Each structure stands twice: as C-alpha cells, then as structure tokens.
Image: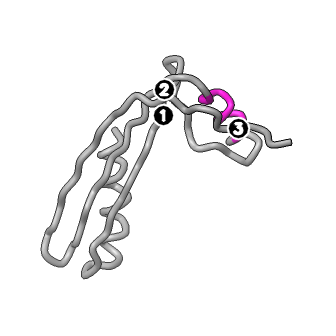
C-alpha cells in the first residue's frame, strides 16, 4: 500500500515536471491493530505521540523514484517494528 501511494504521488509530480527526478514517499503506522493516519492538528499529533510513546508499533514506508522524460520508474517499501521511548518527556 505505501509503495503504491508513493508511486501515485511521484507520478503526479513527474507528469508535471517531466525532466525532474522526483522522489515520492508514503508512511503508515500501525499500533494495537489500528492505522494511525495523518493527524488533523497539533492536539491530535500530540495524542498520537503519547499513544506511541514507550510502545512497540510497526512503521511501513514506501519510496518511488520517477523521471517521466526517460521512463525512470523505481519503487520500494519496507516495514519495521519500532519502540518510541520518551517522545513527550516534560522538562521542568
């Protein structure tokens, strides 16, 4: 899914800038069998970081490289388990 989304993004930009080398990227985070989508605002971003802090979660990242002028098309994706430690430590 993430490599497909990265390719869609890169294709869109590459079609508008055919001579440019374009790198598209997409990331999805899973925790507790749920997908964390892009936060709507700062408060939601903070809540997500608190949910991830000190817990193991899975991060999938996709990359796509495009250049329309010569048909360059490469893409890859990977997933890794991560543990975010102390993301929101308060300093007094």
**Numbered tag placed on residue 9 in the rendering:** none
The answer to whether the residue labelled 2 contacts the one labelled 3, judged by CB atoms less than 8 Å apart, is no
The numbered disc on residue 29 is 1
Q: Residue at x 49, y 18 (%)?
A: 33
Is 70 colored magenta in this rendering? no
The earlier-in-sequence mark between 3 and 1 is: 1
Magenta segment, principal secondary structure?
helix
Residue 29 x %, y %: 48, 34
Furthest residue toward bottom: 19
Q: Is residue 47 magenta?
A: yes
Residue at position x 25%, y 62% from top? 65
Region of the chain picked out in magenta, as a range: 46-53
- In front of the other: 47 or 72: 47
SS at circle 2: strand
Give x and y (percent) for residue 24.
35, 59
Position of residue 1 in the picture relative to residue 83 (left or right): left
- Left or right of 88, for residue 27: left
Label 3 to label 1: alpha-carbon separation: 18 Å
Q: Which SS class for mark 1?
A: strand
**Residue mark closest to the camera, 2 vs 3:** 3
Contact? badges 2 and 1 (CB < 8 Å): yes
- Label 3, secondary structure: give it: loop
Q: What is the spatial separation of the Cα atoms under label 2 and label 1, in whole angstroms?
A: 7 Å
Q: From this view, report whether residue 68 is shown above or below residue 24.
A: below
Q: Quadrant of residue 36?
A: top right
For disc 2, the marked residue is 57
Q: Which residue is mark 3?
A: 88
- In the picture as drawn, the residue positioned furthest to the left comes out as 70
């Amino acid at each position: 899914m993430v490599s497909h989304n990265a390719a869609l993004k890169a294709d869109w930009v590459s079609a508008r800038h055919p001579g440019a080398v374009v790198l598209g990227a997409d990331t999805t985070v899973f925790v507790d069998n749920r997908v964390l989508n892009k936060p709507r605002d700062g408060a939601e971003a903070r809540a997500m970081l608190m949910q991830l802090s000190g817990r193991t979660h899975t991060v999938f990242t996709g990359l796509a490289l495009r250049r329309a002028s010569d048909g360059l098309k490469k893409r890859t994706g990977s997933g890794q388990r991560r543990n975010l430690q102390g993301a929101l430590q308060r300093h007094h």
